[in-house]
Image (spheres, rainbow, N blue to C red):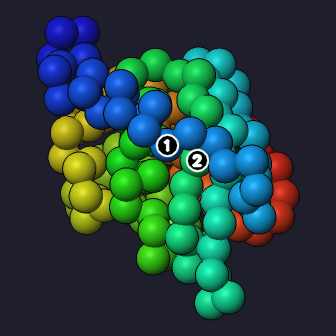
Amino acid sequence: MTALYNRDILSLAVAAADFPLIPSARHRATARAPLCGSRIVIDLDADSAGRVTAVGLHVEACALGQAAATLLARHAPGQRIGELQAARDAIAAWLVGTGAASDWPGFDLLAAARDYPARHGAILLPFDAAIAALAGREAAA
């Protein structure tokens, strides 16, 4: 597990605290990954064109889930729901080895997690929650 939880992952995990929940956010969803029990609350604001303008997080997950949440929060601004869905689908395919490496910034740092399918749900959870929030529904687990 040492390679899985390296300094870069732990640094990203800690950085999730840089994105506190937004009490006045227009969009909120809570999601849980049933396999590992990870949980996330995500707040999003979006402009009139549906582009994310702000992200807030409360993450109760392993370091990989927290790291993925940080990567989502850092790079979601400017994205629309369709772009988030496409990124989530590409990451899911990459994790199971049926797709090319994700072009979402920073996901190369999570490459070691591909060998740990039990962690994939925690990694995808921030995207699932963001998509659900923008769609105005709770995330499917």
Residue 46, image x, y percentages: 63, 74
Q: What residue type is labelled 2?
A: Gly
- Residue visible at 70% across and 32% down in the picture: 32
- Residue visible at 66% across and 49% down in the picture: 22
Q: Is residue 117 visible?
A: no
The quadrant the C terminus occupies is top right
The relative height of residue 1 versus residue 62 in the rendered view (above or below) is: above
Where disc 2 sits, the SS reads: strand
- Residue visible at 77% across and 64% down in the picture: 26
Q: Which mark is residue 62?
A: none
Q: What residue type is labelled 1?
A: Phe
Looking at the image, which is closer to me, 72 or 120? 72
Looking at the image, which is closer to me, 51 or 114? 51
Residue 91 position by quadrant: bottom left
Q: Can residue 61 be seen in this view?
A: yes
Q: How far apart are marks 2 and 1 (CA)?
A: 5 Å
Q: In the picture provided, is 33 more to the left or to the right than 112?
A: right
Direction right: furthest residue:
137
Looking at the image, which is closer to me, 126 or 117? 126
Label 2 neighbourhood size at 10 Å, few (<14), some (14-19), many (20+)? many
Residue 111, image x, y percentages: 22, 38
Residue 98 position by quadrant: bottom left
Q: Name the residue under label 1.
A: 19
Q: In the picture provided, is 141 more to the left or to the right than 121?
A: right
Residue 51, image x, y percentages: 56, 79
Q: Could you tell me if the residues under marks 2 and 1 are in contact, i.e. CB atoms within 8 Å?
A: yes
- Residue visible at 36% across and 25% down in the picture: 14
The relative height of residue 110 versus residue 104 in the rendered view (above or below) is: above
Q: Residue 56 carries which label?
A: 2
The quadrant the N terminus occupies is top left
Residue 90, image x, y percentages: 39, 62
